[in-house]
Image: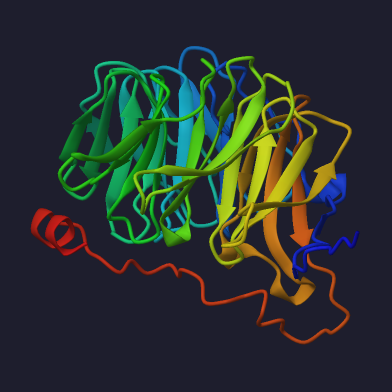
Amino acid sequence: MSFRIRESRFRHVFGKPLKRTDCFDNIRITKTAWDSTFCAANPKYIAIITESAGGGSFLVLPLNKPGRIERDCAKVSGHTAGVLDIAWCPWHDNVIASASEDCTVKIWQIPEGGLVINLDEPIVDLVLHQRRVGLVIWHPTANNVLLSAGSDNKVVIWNVGTSEPLTEIEFPDICLCASFNPIGNLLATTCKDKMLRIIDPRTGSVVKERKIHDGSKPSQCAYLRDNKVFTTGFSRMSERQYALWDADNDLDEMCMEEIDSSNGVMFPFYDSDTNLIYLAGKGDSCIRYFEISAEEPYVHYLTMYQSGDPQRGMCMMPKRGVNVNACEINRFFKLHTKGLCEIIPMTVPRKSELFQDDLYPDTPGDNPSVKCGRLVLWSGC
């Protein structure tokens, strides 16, 4: 019986962390039990949610100034309760959104070069949710469009320029995760009621829905290209699973696999350029990565990055920030439980020093393709 190893240019991708002196150390990382990644990166800064008394705060650190962080380092500290999620604007590297237990979403303008003194005045304050807000996501193609999800079972699409909601979407339970498709005219969500929904963000109407993972623990989702949705969750026996769903055919199940019996929520990080997806579980000490293809079983396991320390949080650098000269295809920032933010480049080994165009197809830039506006965005997508 013959056995053929599947060919892939990403079969030998490996992760190698930078030296401790080239990472960020001595950080008081938040201790909240909320299921979030607790950090966000862009080509200029890494933002990390911190533990603070009497309000919520997060650090914004320039990537060109690694090392030990002083305890009195300047922070963004305008929330009156803990910060639960943060997200950098894809069009403006100095603009970041934050969601908090104080029921608000705030937009911040970071001074060029980073913070020198504490920043406590946002440029925009978005107030509508009645309970804590645990999720913020920027629209992938439209300028000044932001999604927020709160524990009031409501998802709001905002026009950040006017501080007004464009769409309000009511859910039967808490929305746990949301992900736009590449052009932003559809939205995938997972909910505490164990349902995966495809929603039109312009109208708030549910296009398709189905029950996915049977377990009661939180599930996550990522909207892939070719109208596929990748989810992570738990089985009825609390085993961790991943699954792929076909949004072209009533969310038919394409595959579902069990991984292990750990209890940490797995966060999917999707690279649409390479069609790779990375899974990083809370409390795990590894990152698993898979390649998505049109061939069965559709989700192909590649390998695993293994380290000795568990992760408290994780984020991925946008493709604009990777080192193409070193054949780096992705870069992760791993938050350790002991205050270290470790940087882990993912590299494809190549002998040639020339630019490897097969690894770097055209990627989204930093200019939006759509301007925000009810008539432009919600009728033109």
Q: Residue at x 23, y 42 (%)?
A: 158
Q: From the viewer's perspective, is residue 273 above or below residue 26?
A: below
* Colouring used for the render: rainbow
Identify which residue is drawn at 73% across, 66% down: 328
Residue 28 image point, x, y percent: 67, 25
Please indicate, yes or no, whether residue 60 appears anywhere in the rendered image: no
Q: Nearer the viewer, residue 288 or 7?
A: 7
Q: Quadrant of residue 338?
A: top right
* Looking at the image, residue 300 lies above or below residue 20: below
- Furthest-bottom residue in this view: 354
Outermost residue, front direction? 1
Tell me the quarter of the image containing the C terminus.
bottom left
Q: Nearer the viewer, residue 56 or 38?
A: 38
* Residue located 58% across and 60% down the image: 43
Q: Report whether 334 appears left or right of 77.
A: right
Q: Depth check: 68 or 10 in front?
A: 10
